[in-house]
Amino acid sequence: MKVKFEDFFLLDEELTEEYKILRDSVRKFVNEEVIPIIGEYWERGEFPKHLIEKIAKLGLIGSYMPVEYGGGGFDKLAYGIITRELERGDSGIRSFVSVQTSLVMYPILKFGSEQQKKKYLPKLASGELIGCFGLTEPDAGSDPSSMKTRAYKKGNYWVLRGSKMWITNANLSDIAIIWAKDDDGIIRGFIVERDMGYKSREIKGKISLRASDTGEIILDDVEVPEENRLPFAEGLKPALMCLNQARFGIAWGAVGISQFCLERAINYSKERIMFSNPIASFQITQQKLTDMLTLTQNANLIAYRIAKLELENKLTHYHVSYAKRYNVRAAKIVCDMARSILGANGITLDYHVMRHMANLEAVETYEGTYEIHTLILGEFLTGIEAFRK
Ligand SMILES: Cc1cc2nc3c(=O)[nH]c(=O)nc-3n(C[C@H](O)[C@H](O)[C@H](O)COP(=O)(O)OP(=O)(O)OC[C@H]3O[C@@H](n4cnc5c(N)ncnc54)[C@H](O)[C@@H]3O)c2cc1C
């Protein structure tokens, strides 16, 4: 039997035909429609909006939402495969799908009223509506409980005042899931429509996730009807539950980057001749490739395992923290090694590796930084929370 480096532990053999078709269709889309154009968009600092319709038609938005609300009715293994394949292309494309699915549709599905689900979910799944998720603020990043955005109750509506920072899809968005504290200090979630009056401003000068829309959301006494409050979201936990969904996709997505960079480095090293020999023939190159293989396959094993645990209803947020923390850090190391194997070519957009490497800086920071996931696991190990002194 011939073992391939892409799937060293033959994990794809565990997939049914349905998952394989999904994997192949997303990979084809990424190879044909993302990779050829993404460098230009990244350089211009622009999200390729024209891909939204195609992404929606392929069923990649809301893949694990129920069919009755316009979702794909798939499970989380399918979601993982989708995010892995999309992130082979670019973290910005995967981020778009993660936010729309796990940070906008998921909170409406989980904490919304029936009326809210019917009104928003099908349009979000079809890409007719674009959403964003506003939790982070200029002075509240890793500790969202310190948020300053307020929601004042006035009769049958709420007045939202504050600002949100580093929000993916902010400028593209038609609706925003906004988290704000009420008069009693309780965090509540709201579905705020653009027409209700929130403003957004693009964050410029990013050297990471350049092909993703990142912005600031300004809430200047925005009036939101009571019917737009998520009735079943109270406290910080619902927001953290949303992040946990998205982190699952990031753990899978990082594997896509590692797989892509490993493949690039193997191919390049066999073709590049230096000192009259392919650089693949040098022991130091082979050591790098072997380390890259190990990191990539470990990450892939973890990704499959968290999906299996999810299907068996045994997945905890600790598993997800472990996976997000390890897989993203592994991808960063893999990119770094691939970049060195590609020499000067490695720093160009044409070879894609450095773009991935730069993107991973943001990916390692959002959805809980490396350090925050370290502390979550530290708390798991010791029973002691070390977030604050
Ligand atoms: C491109 C991009 C897109 C994003 N998209 C969204 C989005 O759509 N919605 C949203 O709400 N947010 C989004 N974010 C925000 C992201 O979630 C935050 O950046 C993240 O939570 C970290 O917050 P911070 O940047 O304020 O860093 P800080 O919290 O200020 O942390 C700075 C450093 O201090 C470390 N640190 C903090 N606390 C501790 C501690 N207790 N112990 C040890 N080290 C600690 C951190 O690990 C980090 O290294 C996005 C960010 C980026 C870069």
Image (cartoon, rainbow, N blue to C red):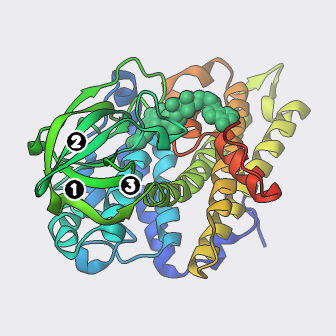
Q: Residue at x 58, y 21 (%)?
A: 347
As shown in the figure, which amino acid type bears the numbered disc 1?
Answer: Gly
Q: Is residue 230 above or below residue 173?
A: below
Query: Can you give x and y, in whole percent of width and height, for residue 201 in the image?
Result: 25, 26
Q: Which residue is mark 3?
A: 103
Q: Quickly name the residue at label 1.
A: 127
The image position of residue 67, as x and y in percent, is 28, 79
The Cα–Cα distance between marks 1 and 2, rounded to whole angstroms, is 26 Å
Element marked by disc 2? strand
The foreground one among 125 and 343 is 125
311 in relation to 179, above or below: below
Depth order, front residue of 149/168: 149
Which x, y percent locates residue 242? 44, 58
Kindly indicate the quadrant of the structure image that contains residue 306: bottom right
Q: Is residue 46 left or right of residue 252?
A: left
Secondary structure found at label 3: helix
- Sequence order check, earlier mark of 3 and 2: 3
Which residue bears the numbered disc 2? 160
